[in-house]
Amino acid sequence: MRFASASALALITMLLSPARSFAVTDWTVEVLPGTVLANFNADDFIVSTSLGKSQPSLVSTMPNISLGLAFASPEGFLDLKLGTGMLLNANLSSFQVYGTAGYSYEMRPSVLFGPHVTLNYFTAPDWWGDENVEFSNSLGFMLGLHLIAGDKISYLLSMDYLSLSFDAEKGAGANAVSLAKDKLDMSGIAVQFGIRAQF
């Protein structure tokens, strides 16, 4: 949580700076196919039947794509983005939509660095096992830092803390199924890598 708190504090400080003014606006497109999420507690959610047990894996992927606006300032860009993607795990999947606000400080020509915050909405996961398990939709959030290297077409690397959990219960007629917990905690650290276009 220290990493998440530091990211949030850095973003708030940059956005509230009295000397900051935003002018020229660019469109941005970000494609992040290489997103890996390490789920700290996902394997605590155990689904048991008379035939055995199953549980989510500790590693998930979250490929996503976003479209947004970059507002120029003397030191960098304020980014506002909307996006969509998926959460994919060994035993479940969920769709997501999200909104992100961040600031990219120009450390040197063609190199930007800064904090961001994301609000995520995830649909109820589909459980891929044979067991009948039902989940709720969920809101989550991400706090992180990103590095952008390049000009109009850039490489983007991001590290984030994700807070996310789903309520869970046995599905209708699933009397033979037992759940170790009534919540599936998918919180963890995400590393995202992809391409950013700004035009």
Image (cartoon, rainbow, N blue to C red):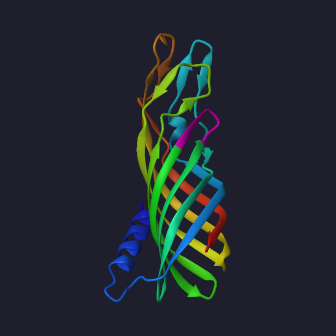
Q: Main secondary structure of the magenta part?
A: strand
Which residue is nearer to you in this view: 138 or 152?
Answer: 152
Residue 91 is a magenta residue = yes
* Quadrant where the C terminus is found in the figure: bottom right
Q: Is residue 132 above or below residue 114?
A: above
Q: Is residue 107 above or below residue 56?
A: below
Which residue is nearer to you in this view: 92 or 119?
Answer: 119
For image coordinates 57% across by 79% down, the residue present is 112
Q: Is residue 9 above or below residue 134?
A: below
Residue 29 on image: x %, y % = 60, 64
Which residue is nearer to you in this view: 150 or 92?
Answer: 150
Left or right placement of residue 100 versus residue 35 in this view: left
* Quadrant where the N terminus is found in the figure: bottom left
Residue stretch rendered in magenta on the structure: 88-95
Residue 56 on image: x %, y % = 58, 35
Q: Quadrant of residue 93?
A: top right
Residue 127 on image: x %, y % = 57, 28
Which residue is nearer to you in this view: 1 or 114?
Answer: 114
Residue 22 is a magenta residue = no
For image coordinates 49% across by 65% down, the residue present is 144
